[in-house]
Image: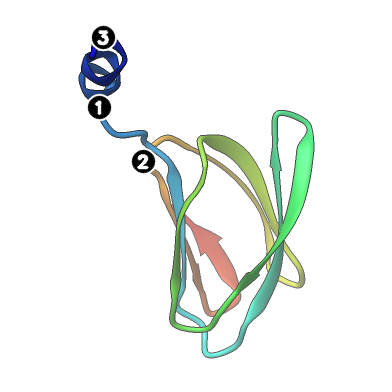
């Protein structure tokens, strides 16, 4: 019971989302706390809860730092928050 109360009190985790508004898929490398992983960002889709605080590098687009409730947007081969 105590574990359940603690989990409820902590609230939802806040994590970075990435929205790909381009008409093409993009390959990304997500680096969080020194650990990297690859992620395919499908055209017109949003990847939710990608990381808590990370660097996002997208081939032929660029690199951006994001954290918390940031929503990173890929549009016209450019990155923004």
Q: CA distance from mark 2 to mark 3?
A: 28 Å
Question: Going by the image, does 70 lie left or right of 58?
Answer: left
Above or below, 41 against 37 in this view is below
State the residue at coordinates (29%, 22%).
Answer: 7
Name the N-terminal-most of marks 3 and 1. Answer: 3
Above or below, 13 against 24 in this view is above
What residue is pinned by disc 3?
2
Mark 1 lies on a secondary structure that is loop
- Residue 37 percent across, percent down from the top left: 75, 52
Name the N-terminal-most of marks 2 and 1. Answer: 1
Q: CA distance from mark 2 to mark 1?
A: 14 Å
Mark 2 lies on a secondary structure that is loop
Above or below, 11 against 27 in this view is above
What residue is pinned by disc 2?
69
- Residue 32 percent across, percent down from the top left: 67, 36
- In-front residue for pair 66/5: 5
What residue is pinned by disc 1?
11
For discs 2 and 3, the disc positioned in front in the rendered view: 3
State the residue at coordinates (26%, 20%).
Answer: 4
- Residue 17 percent across, percent down from the top left: 44, 54
Q: Residues within 10 Å of mark 1 (few under 14, many from 20)?
A: few
State the residue at coordinates (36%, 33%).
Answer: 13
- In-front residue for pair 26/9: 9
For discs 2 and 1, the disc positioned in front in the rendered view: 1
Q: Residues within 10 Å of mark 2 (few under 14, many from 20)?
A: some
- In-front residue for pair 77/72: 72
Mark 3 lies on a secondary structure that is helix
State the residue at coordinates (48%, 57%).
Answer: 80
Name the N-terminal-most of marks 2 and 3. Answer: 3
In the picture, residue 12 is in which quadrant?
A: top left
Query: Farthest residue toward the front?
Result: 1
- Residue 44 percent across, percent down from the top left: 44, 82
């Amino acid at each position: 019971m105590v574990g359940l109360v603690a989990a409820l009190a902590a609230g939802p985790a806040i994590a970075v989302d990435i929205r790909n508004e381009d008409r093409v898929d993009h390959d990304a490398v997500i680096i969080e706390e020194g650990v990297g992983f690859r992620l395919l960002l499908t055209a017109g889709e949003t990847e939710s809860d990608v990381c808590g605080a990370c660097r996002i590098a997208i081939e032929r687009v660029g690199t951006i730092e994001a954290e918390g409730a940031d929503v990173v947007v890929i549009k016209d081969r450019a990155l923004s928050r």
